[in-house]
Image (cartoon, coloured by chain):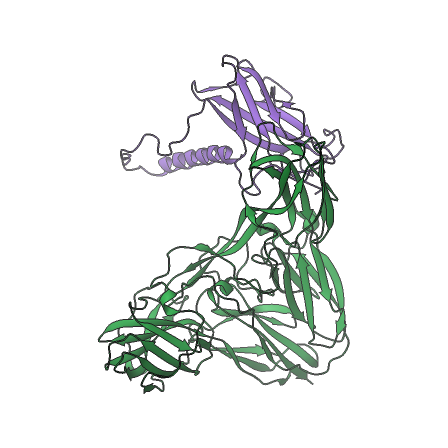
Chain colours: A purple, B green
Amino acid sequence: MRIAFAVVVTALVGMGLAASAALAQEQPPPIPTPPGTPNPWPGKKFDVFFYVETLTASPGESIFGKAAPQRCTQTNFFARGERAVWHISAVNARKGTIITNEDVKYAYLKIPGMKNIGVTYTPHGRDPATAPWTWTARWDIPLDYPLGVVPFELVMKLKNWPKGKVATFKQIPISLEQMTVIGSR
Amino acid sequence: MRWREKTSRAAGRARLSGLTAALAGAAAISVLVAPSAVPATAPPGPRAVPPPTIEGVPPLPGPITAPGKPGSNGLLLLKSTPDTGNVGTKFTLSGGGLPENKSVDIVWGTSRGAFMLDVQPVNVAYEGRKFEPISVVLGRAKTDASGGLSVDLTAPEDYGETHDLYLVSNGVQLAKGGFRITRNFSVTPSEGVLGSPITIKVTGLGAHPFLSTVAIIYDNKYSGFISATTTRGTAVAQVRAAGPVGVHTIEVAPASAAVPYLDIEQSAIAFVGKHRTTFRVTKDVGPPRNSVEFPANPTPTVDSRVTLTVGTSAGVTARLAPQSGPILSNVKLSASGLAPSAPAELQWLTTQGSRVNGLGWSLDQWPLGRAATAADGSLSASIKVPEDLGGWHTVRIVQAGQVKAEVPYYLSQRLAGVTAVKVKAGEEFTVHLKGIGWTELDNALAVTYDNAYIGYACGFYSQGDIKMNLVASGGPGTHLIDLYPMVYKSGAMNDVWLRSTPMLSFKQDAPGLALGYRIPAYHLAIRVVK
């Protein structure tokens, strides 16, 4: 879930280093990229690209009164009674545009044993004018929820899509990288 | 490092051993590995070596199965009561709303642990550990007529922390639950004379680098680490009761990096906890006898061996008996299928060099002597194992310049002696060992003094010989020196374990066991006098 973020950070750092190097000395002309396949990692084509991260909430937010020791921190481990928060970015891969609430008919999370949890497009911060907007969901984990992996599924339907067509996201089944409920911290 | 095999060698380095050639006919003594089964070259690159079968190590909790896929209607939830406990905890798995009268598999999510090794002609490189997620069938059950399920289960002897539980029918996951195996510690006995063994058993070590390892702290001294990489979360280790007479504190501390993590209460994995107890040394009855403690002797799971280069020609068989032993052992070599009534050269393949002087090391061949085959192409000879590095070597049979057979031989370590055993504090004493190897698994031993880790000694550059000069310290009485197997991680950092520290659970969980390496611990003692 954090791969996309890491790629962005790495790219930014790389751009910064490149700029510094350019100031320090004149660079030789770049070696042209050899011709290759346009898409070196061909895969399925999707209509929507999702970036999904899970984070801890702030103290007092969970209805069960429990909170992780650090707020608003990326993690895939949540103790029973804590609130899990999703931050999701969605991109219309066909148009190359950010998907906002204007584009979406509905979006929700499916969590085993729970009612579907609505996913809303909200500002992350006190001032909506300056705060970054993100798709968000929250789940207060029941005190008796089973321990272990939570195989949640994100479902999103765009307004102009035909009946039955939705975009979905599931976690990559990598051990210890999936959302996991633990008894306590 | 140089991988070039030397084809000639200085005469001054020749180690001609006693050789007796005789006509074939002597009964071949069985060996563990048939040479014909050994591949000519080791497969390149690091790989997870399958753990060997070792008595006392728990098996998989059930047959491996596919984890199943979620059904189109999503997953129901299962309740485990209790849902947390030690290995052996009885719990009930229950749920409702399931299909009526349906037979289901209870699928338990777990892992398969292995060491990552790269077996090369001149080295075994340690590349870390691998925990592969797998699913096993823990049991089978049938839902009742109303779609309910209640089944009594026992937490298996398995890796610690959370395990997913799924009800699976025809490959479809119907419901999901979970159970957490917690760590459990035992330290026995609680008292004994100085030098007596203290056994530490841990169950529920996790299948993840940061959940998998603990360390022993003895009177605030680091003694070594305990792991259960290939032993399904259960580890058994021993340290010896170090003096002086009186009560001593033992702590089994979390140790992801193989050294103790001292503020686990503030860690993101504080839930792993730690264990503290005491041991009372009742009496100092003098230094216990020196002893060498070998690990289990399982059948290796990997045929690849260092120094094997060419393999054995078609139609030729060759055997050594015994297949392992210390330096200067007499070994019987028998072969068949060779060119009849012809001379044969016998060679010993080894390595020479160093990791630290920049020149590297390479394969070397030492002459073991000459023999002659019988009219039927058989050969029987006696060879003497050179005074050399320990570990796997190859005995070669060469005829007319062509390698006809290569047979692996394991040169085992041995204690040459300790001098002096009665010393004053500040005086020097020497620990002398033979047959130390050169790979990252057996080139060195980690050393403790009264259960305090003090460093390691290596025998590679000295061709298997360790003479370790130590200084006696502490008050009058018995003092313990223990040497343990360790991992010398050369360039491989694909692991959080720090290098060169004592592997206290070496008897069952050591990377070399799958390759046939049997690296012992040495339990030595001196007496400090006024």
Q: Residue at x 76, y 79 (%)?
A: B283
Compared to B312, does A50 lie above or below?
above
Quick one: B502 or B177, which is closer to the camera? B177
Q: Residue at x 73, y 44 (%)?
A: B92
Quick one: B321 or B432, which is closer to the camera? B321
Q: Position of residue A98 (x, y in %)?
A: 49, 20
Compared to A110, does B202 lie above or below?
below
What quarter of the picture does the C terminus of chain B occupy?
bottom right
Q: For residue B464, what is the image quadrant?
A: bottom left
Can residue B351 be seen at all in this image of the molecule?
no
What quarter of the picture does the N terminus of chain B occupy?
bottom left
Quick one: B453 or B165, which is closer to the camera? B165
Q: Position of residue B344 (x, y in %)?
A: 27, 79
Q: Residue at x 54, y 18 (%)?
A: A157
Q: Is residue B393 left or right of residue B90?
A: left
Compared to A151, does B202 lie above or below?
below
Q: Residue at x 45, y 22 (%)?
A: A47
Q: Position of residue B359 (x, y in %)?
A: 35, 66
Q: Position of residue A30 (x, y in %)?
A: 29, 35
Count the labels in the image: 0
Quick one: B529 or B343, which is closer to the camera? B343
Compared to B405, does B63 lie above or below?
above
Can residue A175 be seen at all in this image of the molecule?
yes
Q: Is residue B251 left or right of residue B321?
A: right
